Amino acid sequence: MLSRAQLLGLDLTKDLIASRCSQGNWQRVYPGVYAVFSGELNREAVLWAAVLRAGRGAVLSHQTAAELWGLADAPNSLIHVTIPSDRRVS
């Protein structure tokens, strides 16, 4: 899982990113977040994508954090992410 900013920081072009996605080698998970592999996303990939989508300073929290620490009985369909108070994510 990589953000668009991370990919561009690796000197990949927006055209290369689009090409890899259209060829089915990569997949766009959220706006600006890509799985640099094909196939189904596992739970870890889904959680990491949510953190990348939320951006700078984002962390998994609440029940999702409890899941990662083995404190929850089962994964929840909601992914809880906390971001710094000076930011907003839609």
Image (cartoon, rainbow, N blue to C red):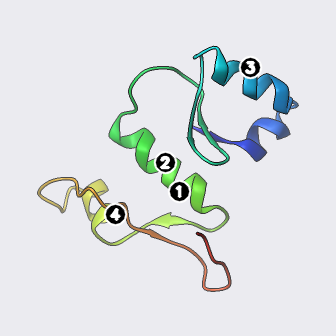
Residue 77 picture location, percent across and down: 26, 56
* Residue corresponding to mark 4: 65
The residue pinned by badge 3 equals: 19
Q: CA distance from mark 4 to mark 1?
A: 12 Å
- Outermost residue toward the front in this view: 22
Whether residue 50 is situated above or below residue 22 in the rendered picture: below
Does residue 23 lie above or below 35 as drawn? above
- The amino acid pointed to by label 4 is Ala
Q: Picture coordinates of residue 23 (x, y %)? A: 64, 14
Residue type, mark 1 in image:
Val
Measure the C-alpha gap from mark 1 to mark 3: 24 Å
Left or right: where 72 falls relative to 27:
left
Q: Does residue 41 appear left or right of residue 20 in this picture?
A: left
Quadrant the N terminus occupies = top right
Crowd around label 2: few <14 · some 14–19 · many ≥20 (10 Å): some
The label nearer to you, 1 versus 3, is: 3
- Residue 51 - label: 1
Tell me if label 4 and label 3 are in contact, CB under 8 Å. Answer: no
Quadrant for the C terminus, please.
bottom right
Of the two numbered discs 4 and 1 on the same chain, state the one appearing first in sequence. 1
Graded by Cα atoms within 10 Å as few (under 14), some (14 to 19) or many (20 or more), the crowding at tag 4 reads some
Q: Are marks 1 and 2 in contact (CB under 8 Å)?
A: yes
Label 2 sits on what residue type?
A: Trp
Answer with the quarter of the image where residue 63 lies.
bottom left
> Observer-nearest residue: 17 or 7?
17
Tell me the residue that label 2 is attached to: 48
Spatial CA span between label 4 and label 3: 35 Å
